[in-house]
Image (cartoon, rainbow, N blue to C red):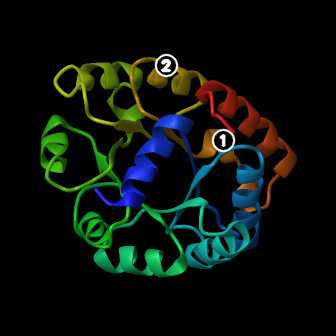
């Protein structure tokens, strides 16, 4: 395990919340990343499916410095992982297993790799992933599915993602998730030019649910 991977594992367990930014407006997405960090959300993922995501990552890295946790999400290919790293991402998040995971691990980057089924979890055991993102968690029954999945895999660091509102986040964390990944229930329309004040209010709520230590 690289020093960076170990540091991410520690941060994930301490803060228990990853914000997911996927916006249609690059400037608004950048402002959203900054507002989240300023509101006490220390781990932020910028989805590569959003507008100029690499540019958003570069700007956020320049503004926040080397220590900030800035992830690239929706990493599918080795090229995605390479470009994300070059843009300043120090975390890679994928929707599934594959070349994006392999390249990120090769580069010594922490990876939250997407899984859904027990077969996926077993396959991920040799991937080198730092955490396993259950996605889409809501499609499998939400918190009850995490509870069922942890029975055969009690020590796996699961991060449920997909349809995670504040109530579900509290349930997932109570059931043993190391963290939750939250997109639209937290970000809302901020990354498309929406209200940043409302975003900050939601961030305060999720920070309280996760028990984030600032």
Q: Is residue 156 above or below residue 38?
A: above
Could you say where residue 113 lies in the image, as x and y percent from the top left?
32, 52
* Picture quarter with the C terminus: top right
Instruction: Name the outermost residue toward the right.
Output: 197
**Relative to 7, 24 lies left or right:** right
Q: Is residue 180 left or right of residue 63?
A: left
Residue denoted by label 1: 186
Report x, y in % for residue 112. Answer: 37, 52
Q: Which mark is residue 118?
A: none
Disc 1, SS:
helix
**For residue 167, which quarter of the picture?**
top right
Q: Which residue is mark 2?
A: 171
The residue under the point 26% across, 24% down is 150
The answer to whether residue 201 is seen in the rendering is yes
Which residue lies at the image location 53% right of the left edge and 27% below the top edge? 169
Q: CA distance from mark 2 to mark 1?
A: 16 Å
Q: Would you call the spot at circle 2 few (<14 residues within 10 Å), some (14-19), or many (20 or more)?
A: some
Q: For this view, does 207 lie left or right of residue 86?
A: right
Say which residue appears at 37% left-offset and 65% top-offset.
109
Quadrant the N terminus occupies: bottom left
Dividing the picture into quadrants, the one containing residue 30 is bottom right
Q: Secondary structure at mark 2?
A: helix
Who's the residue at 71% across and 52% down the image?
37
Answer whether labels 2 and 1 touch (C-beta < 8 Å): no
Exactly how many numbered labels are in the figure?
Answer: 2
In percent of width and height, residue 52 lies at 60, 77
The residue lying toward the viewer, choosing from 49 and 87, is 87
| Mark positioned earlier in the residue sequence (2 or 1) | 2
- Mark 1, Cα crowd under 10 Å, few <14 / some 14-19 / many 20+, is many
Q: Classify 3 as above or below 12.
A: below
**For this rendering, which residue is in front, 173 or 96?**
173
């Amino acid at each position: 395990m690289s020093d960076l991977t170990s540091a991410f594992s520690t941060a994930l367990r301490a803060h228990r919340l990853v914000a997911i930014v996927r916006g249609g407006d690059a400037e608004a997405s950048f402002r959203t990343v900054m507002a989240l960090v300023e509101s006490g959300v220390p781990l932020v993922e910028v989805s590569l499916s959003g507008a100029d995501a690499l540019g958003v990552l570069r700007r956020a890295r320049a503004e926040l410095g080397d220590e900030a946790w800035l992830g690239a999400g929706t990493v599918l290919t080795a090229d995605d992982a390479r470009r994300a790293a070059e843009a300043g991402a120090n975390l890679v998040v994928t929707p599934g297993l594959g070349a994006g995971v392999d390249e990120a691990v090769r580069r010594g980057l922490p990876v939250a790799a997407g899984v859904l089924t027990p077969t996926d979890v077993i396959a991920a055991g040799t991937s080198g992933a730092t955490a396993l993102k259950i996605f889409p968690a809501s499609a499998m029954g939400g918190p009850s599915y995490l509870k069922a999945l942890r029975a055969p895999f009690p020590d796996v660091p699961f991060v449920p993602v997909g349809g995670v509102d504040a109530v579900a986040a509290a349930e997932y964390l109570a059931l043993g998730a190391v963290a939750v990944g939250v997109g639209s229930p937290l970000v809302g329309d901020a990354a498309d030019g929406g209200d940043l004040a409302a975003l900050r209010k939601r961030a305060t709520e999720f920070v309280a649910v996760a028990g984030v230590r600032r």
